[in-house]
């Protein structure tokens, strides 16, 4: 029987590989497989057909962001022939509770998994238990409500019809992006009237504070654009500040003996 070439061996691996989903996300209520699960399942089959697998990665910059480029290479131990597949994963600019090495390591694992998926024809997106659960859908809907962002653009970005079709990786990416957006501005909050402006100036003068400093705190340049909630917050803060103490040099002396300039004799 003729020896199998690298493509025939890869076909045998793809046909017989069963990579179980041994990991569990309790928050999203779904099972998933990671890079280690795939490697554990594929090693015995590679041993049967006489192949070895190498995975390498490197950091590269695309645009203004860093990506991990992972390459999985299947090598025929007998002929030296090889087949490779490459996948990319973008590093997060910041991930709460993670240091830089953890961010790079997590991104590397993600990229390596998808390099293996491509090489061995593993398609996570078609597995029902790789979709997010109701808790995740509720969480992303809450973020949309907080930011005021519409869901249509997000669904189009991931080429899905509903959030129930979203994969865990898509969910994590979407939530990371949404969390970087500020709260949507509240609607129909009235703007201050002249009486409010007069009160604000009076309080600012009492404590010796420049009105421009107060406006900068609320990211506005014109006091007439201040809304009533900002005014109430500013007044509450100013009311807690004591009166500005006068400069002693500007206080007239109580007696003539205290001298110039207050008792300078007329000439």
Image (tube, rainbow, N blue to C red):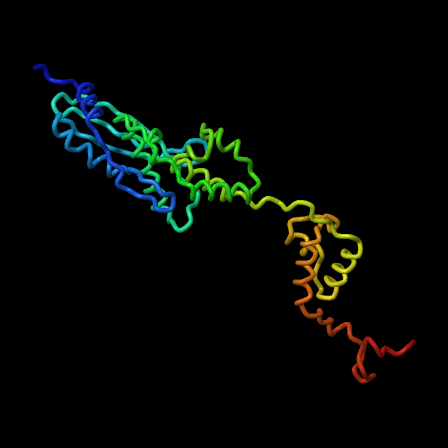
| For residue 239, above or below residue 117 | below
Name the residue at 79% across, 82% down: 258
- The quarter of the displayed image where residue 43 is located: top left
| For residue 205, above or below residue 100 | below
- The quarter of the displayed image where residue 110 is located: top left
Name the residue at 14% across, 32% down: 44
The extreme left residue here reads 1
Residue 122 in the figure: left or right of residue 93? left
Please tell me which residue lies in front, 89 or 196.
Answer: 196
Q: Position of residue 228 (x, y in %)?
A: 71, 53
- The quarter of the displayed image where residue 114 is located: top left
Q: Position of residue 73 (x, y in %)?
A: 23, 27
Please tell me which residue lies in front, 131 or 178.
Answer: 131
Residue 44 in the figure: left or right of residue 152? left
Please tell me which residue lies in front, 241 or 147.
Answer: 147
The extreme top residue here reads 2
Q: Position of residue 69 (x, y in %)?
A: 33, 32
Report the number of numbered marks. 0
| For residue 191, above or below residue 88 | below
Name the residue at 21% across, 24% down: 15
Position of the N terminus, as image quadrant, is top left
The extreme right residue here reads 267
Q: Position of residue 184 (x, y in %)?
A: 59, 44
Residue 111 in the figure: left or right of residue 190? left
Position of the C terminus, as image quadrant, is bottom right
Name the residue at 11% across, 23% down: 78
């Amino acid at each position: 029987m003729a020896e199998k070439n690298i493509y025939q061996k890869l076909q045998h691996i793809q046909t017989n590989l069963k990579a179980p989903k041994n990991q569990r996300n309790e928050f999203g209520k779904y099972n998933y497989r990671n890079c280690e699960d795939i490697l554990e399942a594929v090693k015995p089959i590679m041993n049967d057909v006489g192949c070895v697998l190498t995975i390498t990665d490197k950091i590269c910059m695309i645009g203004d962001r860093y990506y991990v480029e992972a390459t999985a290479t299947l090598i025929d131990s007998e002929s030296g022939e090889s087949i490779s597949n490459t996948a990319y994963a973008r590093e997060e600019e910041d991930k709460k509770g993670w240091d830089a090495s953890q961010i790079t390591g997590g991104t590397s694992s993600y990229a390596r998994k998808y390099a293996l998926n491509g090489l061995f024809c593993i398609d996570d997106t078609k597995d029902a238990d790789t979709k997010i659960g109701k808790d995740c859908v509720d969480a992303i809907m809450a973020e949309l409500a907080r930011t005021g962002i519409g869901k249509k653009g997000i669904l189009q970005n991931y080429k899905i019809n509903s959030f129930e079709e979203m994969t865990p990786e898509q969910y994590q990416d979407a939530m990371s992006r949404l969390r970087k957006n500020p709260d949507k501005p509240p609607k129909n909050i009235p703007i201050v009237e002249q009486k409010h402006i007069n009160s604000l100036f009076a309080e600012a003068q009492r404590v010796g504070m420049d009105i421009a400093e107060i406006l900068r705190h609320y990211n506005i340049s014109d006091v007439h654009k201040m809304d009533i909630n900002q005014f109430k917050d500013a007044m509450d803060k100013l009311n807690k500040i004591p009166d500005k103490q006068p400069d002693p040099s500007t206080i007239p002396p109580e007696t003539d003996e205290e001298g110039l300039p207050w008792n300078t004799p007329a000439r």
